[in-house]
Image (cartoon, rainbow, N blue to C red):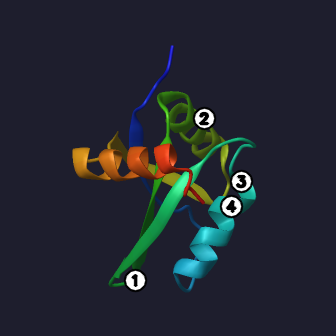
Amino acid sequence: MHDPAVSTVVFGPKKPFGPKGGSELLRALEAELPDGIKTHGFGWRRKGDRIGGWVIVDRTSGRDAVKKMMSQSRRLVLLQTALARPQVQAHLRKQSESGRER
């Protein structure tokens, strides 16, 4: 069965890991992502001394794999997952259908 759902995964650093910025947080995520998990975009935000990031992940199975990875991670902690907004899902579907996906 085809699973068209894409999810937003929100995460942050697990102490004592203290990234100085978004690029360090992204590198930590990329180093731990399971093979075959497709992500789209990355965003991050600093609020005071806290930092958090988010990515879009394809399929329910991809979201579940990232959740499992983060539960075992020594550097990252899962904060939230949610289905991506319909506009984001439509945009990614259009990219996929046109073959312009990165």
What mark, if any, has residue 30 been given in the picture? 4
Query: In the image, what residue type sits under mark 2?
Result: Ala
Point out the residue furthest to the front here. 98
Q: Earlier in the sequence, mark 3 or mark 1?
A: 3
Query: In the image, what residue type sits under mark 1?
Result: Asp
Dot 3 and dot 4 residues touching (CB under 8 Å): yes
Depth check, mark 1 against mark 2: the one in front is 2
Count of residue discs: 4
> Between residues 91 and 39, which one lies in front from this camera angle?
91
Query: In the image, what residue type sits under mark 4?
Result: Glu
**Disc 3 on helix, strand or loop?**
helix
Q: What residue is shown with label 2? A: 65
What mark, if any, has residue 49 been given in the picture? 1
The residue depicted at 39 percent of the width and 33 percent of the height is 5
71 lies above or below 14 = above
Query: In the image, what residue type sits under mark 3?
Result: Glu
Estimate the x, y position of residue 31 in percent, counting from the top left: 74, 60
**Disc 4 on helix, strand or loop?**
helix
Q: What residue is shown with label 3? A: 32
